Amino acid sequence: METKIDCFVAVSGQGGEGEAGSVDIGSPAIVGNFTDSGTTNVNKDNPANTSGRITSIEIWAATDITGLEVATFYVVSGNYLSTRDVETIGAVTAGSIQTFEVNLEVQKGDYLGCYFTGGTIACSEPDYSGYWYQSGDKIPCTNVEFIGTDTISTMSLYGTGISIIPKTYASSSGTLLVNDIDVGGLPRDSGIFSWVRIPCELEVVTDIIGTYFNVGQGIRVAITVDGEPVSDSLIGDITIAHNLNYISTFSFTLGNPKYSPLISPYYIAVNSVVIITAYVNGQAFILFTGLIDETRTTYDGGYRLQINGRDYGKKLLDKTMTLISVQDSADKSYRGSMVKYLAGQADITNINVPTGDKVTIDHSFQDQTLWDMVQKECAIEGWYVQFDENGIMKVQTRKIKITPNWIYGEDKFIQLGLETSDIGIINKLIILGAIFEEETITANPVTPVEVIPDEKVYEYTDYSFSPSFTAGEVVSGWTDGDAVIRVTASYIGYTKPLGYLFPVSQNYKFKITGSDSGKIQGLSFSVSGGATKAGQSSNYVLIARKIGYEYPPLSATEQAFKITITFKIKNQTGGGIEELEEENPEETFTSTITYTQVKATVSDITSIGVYGERKPNNEGTLEFPLAETEAQCKRIGENIILDSHRFIKQPDFEVAFNPKLIVGQTVELTDKKIGYNKDRYFVEEAIHTIGADAEGKMKARTRIGCVYYA
């Protein structure tokens, strides 16, 4: 007979096998011109060739990019576009093809687009169709008008992925393979297909996905503690609680005293690894991997060992450290690498985290838990931390999807409720980021210091030299005195007046030298006999010695003379200061330190119009000292405003046990009794309860807490 399968399938046997293919979308990531940041751009070229998941994005940045978001877009009508799915990548290094793993839903005919806060992306031309653009961050968006270009360029942004096509099969016998990819909102994982074999002889009676909406599903549970199976000793309920803002928890009770903490060798210890697995209609789902926090043993006629624990976030919470300059210890100075480094300090190495922004300031933490350190880093990017059922640490961005992960319609609820509140709304605030310190050093003007010295005291020493020279006696070379004061004579030339045939005088200099020659005071001299004064200076005197001539025969003789030289030497013996101190004051410098704090003011005009102006405190400020740019401060403020409005509508509902419904997904609700009409909500809490009813049959339920993102 012919059977239509309501999920992605492949059938082996007479019916054949389903088709698998690849998704191709966007334009090649190659070098070219560039387009700037601050606008949302969507390539018109190469729409998706088929439906499926985009698992890889290639991009060529012309200059280093920060804050990159990518999204799949579809045309509502004309130039009006909506996003189907979004992914945050963060930083991209320029100069070559950069490849990133993503998980983006795509439908045939969708387009690939992006937004980034800083840097430029390469664009190629000619022979391309151009792109749509709109100023600001339009990821995500619903029915927003874009501006279409007619240029011949396209962005270097390319995506590839996988596609599996549902088919209708005719089969009388064979084996049905079912995966968990969704059609029309049914569940799927991140493109990694866990095939389940279901024998079928004549027809497919049901499918595994459908059991999530069936309250009569067949369930059993297996629990191991450090690899030891303990399921046979379970009593009471098993509770698993996931919350977006907290570390996930589990609890269950054992009724066998051999596991008592005081009995060896089976006792159960704190920090033992617990793995909880559920089997739904024969299909296995790992529900939880975590560590024991505490045990409590009681006996009141019956033995009970209650076990409570948390996921691997406990490793981060239990370890307090002081870490200096984390950005220097991480593999790269990007926030994603820093988060990996912090997690590694708790021996967590299996982690998926976006690249994030580049870090340029010091990130040091004193006596803080690794959990707090990670949360502070993630707050800058708008990330949240979640450990999945296999213990893998996943760092992700909150996003409500255009296409929901799950659709719950009429009569699919065991219980359904709605809470509304405007408590805690914030619509205006100032985010204060890092404080930057800059030191400027300037030389002060040199101003001579006015010094009033003490009265100086001097001592004078008299000197007198009176040499006599006979007629014809040689004067040049005469000397008298010592190393302190000495007078020496030297020949300096003759004087011959105009019209004279012979000189009338020979001229000599008597110079004063010695260590005290610079202290001469009151120099004077006199000349008698055959010489006259010719001049003087501060340390020498000049004389002209007359020449006598006799005829015949013609002869010349320098005449006899006497010279007397007197002066005083002035020495300071007390008072005053040296002039050197007055003329050369010490040079001084002034250091000026300027502090500049990064900040951004963020407000929501629409919310203010509805609720009035609401601030987080009297000052309206919140501090995030690790935010180092205005763009980061703005992003933090926008996320805070968005999150504060999520309690406007808070659905909570209980449905048949659904292990694949997890925190961070999007659900669509329809129920006329309360008024839900295909409304989409973000899953913030998921609680699974598994236990036995009064008749001893396993009973499992999933309670979901959702919030609203406008």
Image (cartoon, grey):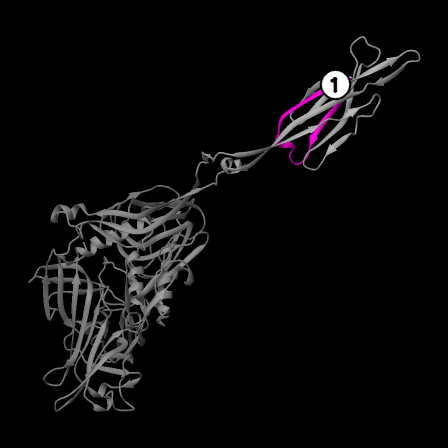
Look at the image and give the residue range highlighted in magenta: 507-529
What quarter of the picture does the C terminus occupy?
bottom left
Name the residue at the right extreme.
553
Residue under label 1, please give it: 528
Query: 196 above or below 257?
Result: above
Q: Is residue 528 magenta?
A: yes
**Position of residue 478 in the picture relative to residue 567 (left or right):** right
The answer to which quarter of the image holds residue 56 is: bottom left
- The image position of residue 491, as x and y in percent, is 78, 24
- The image position of residue 14, as x and y in percent, is 31, 76
Q: Residue 692 versus residue 591: which sits nearer the camera?
A: 591
What quarter of the picture does the N terminus occupy?
bottom left
**Position of residue 596 in the picture relative to residue 692 (left or right):** right
The answer to which quarter of the image holds residue 166 is: bottom left
Secondary structure beneath dot 1 equals strand
Query: 208 above or below 73?
Result: below
- The image position of residue 276, as x and y in percent, is 25, 79
- The image position of residue 529, as x and y in percent, is 77, 17
Query: 363 above or below 262?
Result: above
Q: Amino acid at mark 1?
A: Ser
Q: Is residue 630 magenta?
A: no
Q: Residue at x 43, y 52 (%)?
A: 94
Q: Residue at x 84, y 13 (%)?
A: 502
The answer to which quarter of the image holds residue 533 is: top right
Q: Residue 182 versus residue 633: which sits nearer the camera?
A: 633
Q: Residue 451 versus residue 137: which sits nearer the camera?
A: 451
Query: 76 above or below 224?
Result: above
**Position of residue 268 in the picture relative to residue 92 (left or right):** left
Provide the major secondary structure of the magenta segment. Answer: strand
Q: Residue at x 13, y 61 (%)?
A: 650
